[in-house]
Amino acid sequence: MKFQTVCIVVIVTIGFAAGHDNTTFPDGFLLGAATASYQIEGGWNADGKGVNIWDTLTHERSIYVEDKYNGDLADDSYNLYMEDVKHLKNMGAQLYRFSISWARILPEGHDYKINEAGIDYYNRLINALLDNGIEPIVTIYHWDLPQKLQDLGGWPNIVLATYNENYARVLFKNFGDRVKLWITFNEPRTFMAAYASDTGMAPSINTPGIGDYLTSRTVLTAHANIYRMYEREFKQQQKGKIGISLWNVWCEPISTNQVDACERYQQFHLGLRAHPIFSESGNYPSVPVKRVDHNSRAEGLTSSRLPKITPEEVNCRTGTYDFLGFNFYTSNLGKRGVTGGIPSKGRDTGAILSQDAEWPESASSWLRVVPWALRKQLNWIANAYGNPPIFVTENGYSDYGGLNDTSRVLYYSEYMKEMLKAIHIDGVNVFGYTAWSLLDNFEWLAGYTERFGVCDVDFDDPNRPRIPKESAKVLTEIFNTRKIPERFLD
Ligand code: GBH
């Protein structure tokens, strides 16, 4: 504790010495916007693309999607990507985070059949970005698993780690000469939950407390193997950086005697993935292991539902990062208590969550506006993992649409202010930020009913015109001046 206090004081002094004020982005800080393939591309069966689990879910079980709609056309970025590049350029974005559709590159998931039209598409996009001075930051997997791999059981099947590594190699080979920032996975926490309920995200498989932990294991194996493979085969020549994007919701103790419930929540929802990669132990944090082992025994199981990490795996995993990607939107209130079926991760976690009715709402039931929580969460990460370089890969706000998005403008300015306090006052090592999202897009199970874009898209118009909202104009100002405008300072 003492040591930390000393560090913070030193950093503040350096900050002032260099002439920074707390509402200015540090030199070299990267600013841009983000999207994901299934949410924007469309072209679901164009030019040899294979079927993925979101095609299957939206076509066969559209009842799960709020407006029964799908990503068949979405923003049509498969054809209109130059429009996206134009808007990024107009905003002064330094970088663009997008994801690659696995089934567009490898229609069946395996690397024996490469779809050249898919390679061409991403080559055109990457080259257009670079021609306009925008750096690509590429997510290798943002939830659109090739259906053929789901047919083998999907992520709970450990063999997917190998197939995922083979897919990543195809990307490094084809795009690594120009792409220098890579993200292995977007939000394992979210897509592991897709194996814990049959009314949820694709593939919507009901194996709670088991399939979700197996998914988590496969992801950790794949991430580490991809990192090591890049080191062995590409890094020397391509000189890129690799991270993983983790999602978490801050947990604020509902009262001062409930701190342990929120700490446990952090360990289950963030620590289970972050600890093996970012801590020196290379292993799971101890609290979740003990609790899942205990519950497994109580349920009469001979082996724990949380598969152990072997000593060889520990060595391979720790330090497999150049940065920690972090997606952050909102906060919960937490207290001790048991919720969820037997077995389930919710039950294992032992925290009951709610939100404060005073926190301003968005169009998404889970998302309330709680800017200070970002600063607390960033500090939690910095303290837990030795202050690693953090890239905020997602942060954003949903409404029901419209160009005059005052609430989103406030959301961005308030969250950015808190992030800058974490950087300047607390010394947290955040080096980049991409706003979610560049465009209104297919918001998964919410379909097109919730809008996260800073550019409006008209989904009734087959030409999918994009129009910058008020928030895009404010981000333009922030990206260009590299500080929070005077009028948003209290
Ligand atoms: C991110 O997920 C995703 O990376 C991105 O693709 C997405 O568009 C963006 O956020 C906005 O949601 O319907 O009550 O079951 C953030 C985490 C996980 C939040 C799934 C919504 C579903 C809540 N998301 N969750 S619910």
Image: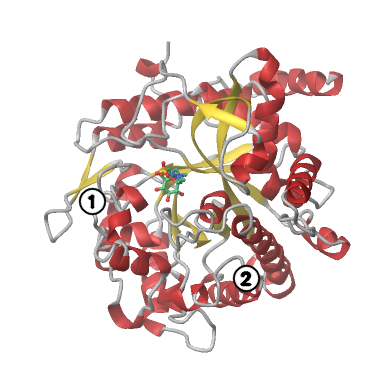
**CB of mark 2 near ligand 1 (< 8 Å):** no
Question: What is the residue that sits farthest to the left in this orientation?
Answer: 461
Q: Which mark is residue 133?
A: none
Q: In the rendered image of this protein, does residue 484 appear above or below residue 241?
A: above
- Residue 389 visible: no
Q: Nearer the viewer, residue 155 or 123?
A: 155
Q: The N terminus lies in which quarter of the figure? A: top right
Q: Is residue 374 above or below residue 46?
A: above
Which residue does the image show at 42% across and 83% down from the upper left? Answer: 115
Residue that numbered label 1 is attached to? 67
* Secondary element at tag 2: loop
Above or below residue 335? Residue 42 is below
> How far from the left and from the top, in percent, is residue 37?
39, 62
Which residue is labeled 2 in the image?
157
Q: Nearer the viewer, residue 351 or 449?
A: 351
User: Residue 246: image x %, image y %?
Assistant: 58, 47
User: Would you identify the image quadrant in which residue 129 lies?
Assistant: bottom left
Q: Amino acid at mark 2?
A: Asn
Q: Residue at x 81, y 42 (%)?
A: 286
Ligand 1 quadrant in view: top left
Q: Is residue 422 left or right of residue 144?
A: right
Q: Which residue, as the protein is rendered here, is positioned at the far front?
A: 300
Residue 190 visible in the current orientation: yes
Q: Is mark 1 within 8 Å of ligand 1?
A: no
- Can you give x and y, in whole percent of width and height, for residue 106 in the image? 47, 80
The Cα atoms of the two marked residues, 1 and 2, are separated by 32 Å
Neighbourhood count class around disc 1 (C-alpha, 10 Å): few under 14, some 14–19, many 20 upward? few
In the picture, the quarter occupied by the C terminus is top left
On screen, residue 38 above or below 371: below
Amino acid carrying mark 1 in the image: Asp
Under tag 1, what secondary structure?
loop
Give the left or right position of residue 282, taking residue 46 as reference.
right
